[in-house]
Amino acid sequence: MVRCIARWLVIAVLVIGYPLLAHYTNESAYRGHLGALVAITPVVLIALILAWRSPRRLLMLGVLALLCAALWAWWPALEHHFGVIYWLQHAGIQLMLCIIFARTLVAGRQPLCTRFAEAVHAPLTSRHEIYARQVTVAWTLFFAAMVLVSTALFFLAPLASWSVFANFMTLPLVVLMFMVEYLVRRRVLPNLRHTHILDAVRAFRNTPLIPR
């Protein structure tokens, strides 16, 4: 019980605390040191986890150490351009998700949302399979739009304005997308066994994005 509570507290800090801190650093150009530190820390931690789990642990940890040394050498430049790191993280994640969804639409592959649907409603009807493919297209376009909006705001608007979109609107927009898809599905597939909207979220979380 204590471990479960601790896990949810960590998740809450990451979901709420990190965006607040990131936005705080983006509001002023005089917070370059903190901004660079907040922007770089997730990248370094993820790289450390991947290096530690790698079969070539020592080699990858050595490469990571060299990269950290390079970051230290370039730290003054990072302090002046830490916003670019934030943008690369945000737009990069959206682009990666866009590509993951899009590549499953290639002929001969199973659309990603079809796999999600099978996790909840298997076996699927032909009509449901067509709908699931259309939903995969919708998610692909959604993430592509997120990349375009993020990039346009970053280069054309003040950094603080981009930060509001990236830190406070991304997650609500994803939640809204789930809700809209759920309502559309109930209208398009009225005879489908009713499931809770969170079932779609669980299927997304439990189904590998990249098939093994």
Image (cartoon, grey):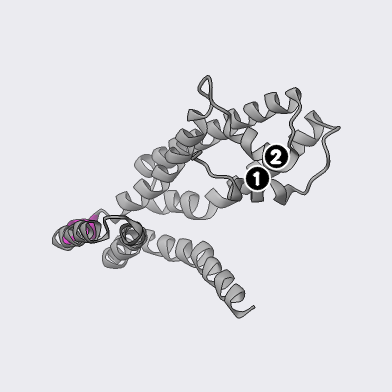
Closest to the observer, 40 or 155: 40
Q: Which residues are magenta?
A: 75-80
State the residue position of label 2: 180
Residue projecting furthest to the bottom: 2
Task: Give the residue displayed 72% in from the left and 43% down from the top.
Answer: 120
Q: Is residue 167 magenta?
A: no
The image position of residue 77, as x and y in percent, is 18, 56
Let me know if residue 153 appears in the view: no
Check contact, mark 2 vs mark 1: CB within 8 A: yes
Task: Give the residue displayed 66% in from the left and 43% down from the top.
Answer: 178
- Identify residue type, mark 2: Val
> Image check: 170 left or right of 42?
right
Rendered position, 170 above or below 74: above
Closest to the observer, 115 or 195: 115
Crowd class of label 1 (few under 14; some 14 to 19; many from 20; radius 10 Å): few
- Identify residue type, mark 1: Leu
Rendered position, 85 above or below 72: above
The image position of residue 151, as x and y in percent, is 39, 39
Task: Give the residue displayed 44% in from the left and 50% down from the top.
Answer: 161
Q: Is residue 79 magenta?
A: yes
Residue projecting furthest to the right: 191
> Image check: 12 left or right of 45?
right
Crowd class of label 2 (few under 14; some 14 to 19; many from 20; radius 10 Å): few
Q: In what element is the residue under mark 1?
A: helix
Q: Quadrant of residue 133?
A: top right
The image position of residue 8, as x and y in percent, is 58, 69
The image position of residue 36, as x and y in percent, is 29, 61
> Any mark on residue 176, and which?
1
